[in-house]
Amino acid sequence: MSVQRAVQLIEAIAIPPLDERAMAAARARQDRLTKPRGALGRLEALSIQLAGIAGQATPRLAHKLVLVMAGDHGVAAEGVSAYPQSVTGQMALNFLAGGAAINVLARQTGARVVVADLGVAAALPTRPDLVDAKVGPGTANLAHGPAMSHDQARQALQAGADLFRRELATGVDILGTGEMGIGNTTPAAAVAAVLTGQDPARLVGRGTGLDDAGLAHKVEIVRRGLAVNTPDAADGLDVLTKVGGFEMGGLAGAMLAAAAHRRPVMVDGVIATAAAMIAVTLNPGLRPYLIAAHRSAEPGHDAMLAWLGLEPLLDLGMRLGEGTGAVLGMQLADAACRLLAEMATFDEAGVDDRGGE
């Protein structure tokens, strides 16, 4: 695909507004179910949001998809991770073998896991269950210049959108976002700093387990990257180009494509949230399609979620990535839909409702 065609396709994505009639019908049904109104708390609001996304009064989430996108980062050369870069490719193969945390939770949830190489530095073996969407063998070092070119950023976005569209043929009712990339909490913090305007010291976390000295160094690397690149907060493509990652671009493109096809997006931790922020900057219409699965233990996640206007479903102290939090969130979304569709109303059950209402 030519770069020009990729530009046209990603910019042509149109996201419809939520279906107000479906939401009104879902809300009315919630008010007639055999329970006090509001007794199921956020599950009720979640079911109404999902109804508006799907355009159906009683949505179903039979087909759950997790896209795990892998990519390496040149900034890893600055010593911002406690693990070597080789782990990215090794973990991608572990996902394919079914041995990672995401695989365990996906099996429990009934979710399909698709692994894509957006930019792993190592040459991964060719195999039918690995999507080869490699933009390059890892990004450049953002501490010294742009992480990628504008053309590469567009290529990553388009690869993610194309991958989601391809998976629609197998069936997708909800998209979960996962990733793998040693060093990727550094570009995620840089993205967060650009878009929230907050000091990197408030956003940068320990990632895979840095000590105090390592954390201070990581903050300085993020500051250096912002000073060297001066990304434009109003331009999502510029932010992705200068301080992002190939896997973030892929996730952002997949999110935009999911919303264009009226599918909800379950956002995982800080990397997926950074991708969501980039995607929302590109198209604000994505925002009501996003659901925050959990609050990461990484310190910047609260500010990122606040920027998106999202309240996470879970707070478990998790910081693994891979889409693990997203899959747990899918279970709650599924429960919300089932309660809405399968509970009896007062009339159906022959149960007395409160008088005068």
Image: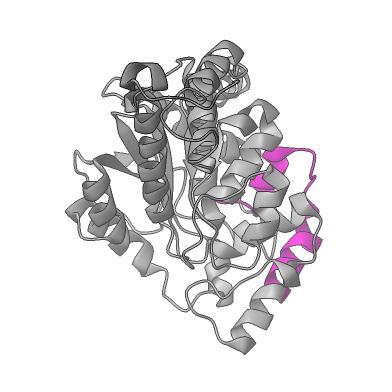
Of all residues, the one furthest to the front in this rendering is: 355
Q: Quadrant of residue 127?
A: top left
Please, is residue 348 above or below residue 108 in the view? above
Is 137 drawn above or below residue 277 in the view shown?
below
Expressed as whole percent of the image width and height from the top left, the position of residue 41 reads: 53, 42
Colour convention: one colour
Write the start and end of the magenta stretch as one range.
Answer: 220-245
Helix, strand or loop for the magenta stretch, by majority: helix
Number of marks drawn: 0
- Residue 355 location (% of width, % of height): 55, 23
Q: Magenta includes 182? A: no
Give x and y (percent) for residue 99: 20, 60
Residue 314 image position (x, y, % from top left)? 49, 55
Question: At 45% across and 15% down in the image, what residue appears?
Answer: 56
Q: Is residue 267 left or right of residue 339?
A: right
Q: Would you say residue 51 is visible in this rendering?
A: yes
